[in-house]
Every structure is written in structure tokens, then in C-alpha cells.
Amino acid sequence: MNSPIKRILIGLVFFVSTQVIAVIGYVLAGWSLLEAIYMVVITIFGVGYGEVRPVTTPSLRIFTILVIIAGTSSAVYTVGGFVQ
């Protein structure tokens, strides 16, 4: 088993990496940096406020789904380290 500290650190690295990759992905899709950061925050934290811009292309929808899965999974993993 991993120690709790190691698990927390791994989770945080994965969480931050997910955020950085997601922001870069939205910027490459033509969004401004602020729009990309805002979209990542409301997507990962499940606010459900609505998209900054319409997510109409299948590739951007798949990317957004992967951001949700990776962000949520890494957050749950990190919290698991705290609980452990």
C-alpha cells in the first residue's frame, strides 16, 4: 500500500496536470486563456454553471468528458489519501 502522504502527492500531481493539460487543450481549440481556465474550473468541480462557449464538435465533447473523468478521479484519489 502507498503511504497517505505519497498518495496525496500523486493525486495532487495528477490533479494539477489534468488542469494544465485541459487549459492547454481549450486554448488550442481557440478559446482565450481566461475562458479556458474558467471552463476547466467549472467542469472539474462540477458546478454545472454552463459552458463558456458551445461545445459543439465531437472531439471537444470527448475532450471535456475526459477532463471531467480525470479531474474527478484525481480529486477523489487525493481525498482518499487524506482519509487514509
Image (tube, helix red, strand yellow):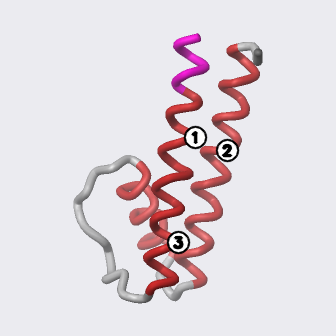
Q: Is residue 38 left or right of residue 30?
A: left
- Badge 3 vs badge 2, beta-carbon distance below 8 Å: no
Q: Earlier in the sequence, mark 2 or mark 1?
A: 2
In front of the other: 10 or 59 = 59
Residue 74 disc label: 1
At mark 2, the secondary structure is: helix
Per the rendered image, the range of residues in magenta is 79-84
Structural distance between the alpha carbons of marks 2 and 1 = 6 Å
Residue at position x 36%, y 81% in the image: 55
Q: Which residue is identified by label 3?
A: 63
Around disc 2, counting alpha carbons within 10 Å, would you say few (fewer than 14), some (14 to 19), or many (20 or more)?
some
Residue 27 position, x and y percent, is 56, 79
Do the CB atoms of the residues marked 2 and 1 lie less than 8 Å apart? yes
Residue type at numbered disc 2: Phe
Judge whether 16 appears above or below 32 on screen.
above
Q: Mark 2 highlights which residue?
A: 14
Instruction: Please tell me which residue is depicted at 67% across the width and 44% down the height of the picture.
Output: 14
Q: Earlier in the sequence, mark 3 or mark 2?
A: 2
Amino acid type, label 1? Ser
